[in-house]
Amino acid sequence: MSLHPEVNKQDHIKGDSSANLEIVEFGDFQCGHCGAAHPVVEKIIKEFGNQVTFVFRNFPLSEMHENAREAAMAAEAAAIQGKYWEMHNSIFENQENLQSSDFIAHAEKLGLDIDKFKEDMQLSSIAEKIDNDFESGIRSGVNGTPSFFVNGNKFDGDAANLLAVIEGSRA
């Protein structure tokens, strides 16, 4: 399966957008496997820096994870104030705390305008972005989280396999 749509200006991009290696993760902030993948993905980004374009697309499995969608909304609301990746990391690093009050605490720690953050959490544009990410996952053949795409093609394996393949390709 291949990625639909391709990485675009709607995506949150970390690293060098012109890098030869593009990794897209479809993830769920409440998924334990995504939580376990997070430090591995961070290691890839740290080790390969400007050689990698990393994109995270929301794929909240709301039927299994009741707080996943709200977590995605918190990350998207933080993005409006320029702190998407900081909130993304904060949620994954505190995955056991995913209540509404926890997201506000994360926002306070990140120095966000809390009233604006709360308002932004209710925006239909944020709900639409999450729905579009989810729809992109469905169209791309995602059936669980985390799911990775490398240079537009579905990667069969977890984050550790991905790290091994990238390290192997560099050798």
Image (cartoon, rainbow, N blue to C red):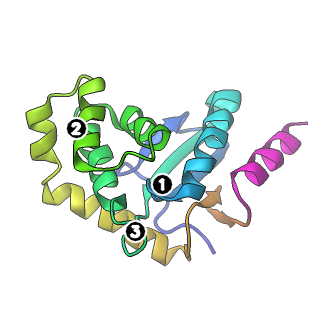
Quarter holding the N terminus is bottom right
| Relative image position of residue 89 (x, y in whole percent) | 46, 37
- If you read the primary sequence from the N terminus, does the residue marked by circle 3 or circle 1 appear first? 1
SS label for mark 1? loop
The question of residue 161 being in magenta is answered with yes
Q: Which residues are magenta?
A: 157-171
Residue at the (55%, 33%) spot, across then down: 15
- Residue at image mark 1: 7
| Relative image position of residue 2 (x, y in whole percent) | 60, 70
Where 19 sits versus 37, above or below? Answer: above
| Relative image position of residue 110 (x, y in whole percent) | 30, 25
- Residue at image mark 2: 104
Residue 92, which numbered label?
none
The question of residue 11 being in magenta is answered with no
- If you read the primary sequence from the N terminus, does the residue marked by circle 2 or circle 1 appear first? 1
- For the residues carrying marks 2 and 1, which lies nearer the camera in this image? 2
Figure disc tally: 3
Q: Specify the amino acid type for callout 2.
A: Ile
Q: Nearer the viewer, residue 138 or 107?
A: 107
Q: Residue furthest front?
A: 96
Are the residues tagged 3 and 1 within 8 Å (C-beta)?
Answer: no
Q: CA distance from mark 2 to mark 1?
A: 30 Å
Q: Residues within 10 Å of mark 1 (few under 14, many from 20)?
A: many
Quarter holding the C terminus is top right
Residue 110, visible in the rendered structure: no
- Residue at image mark 3: 134
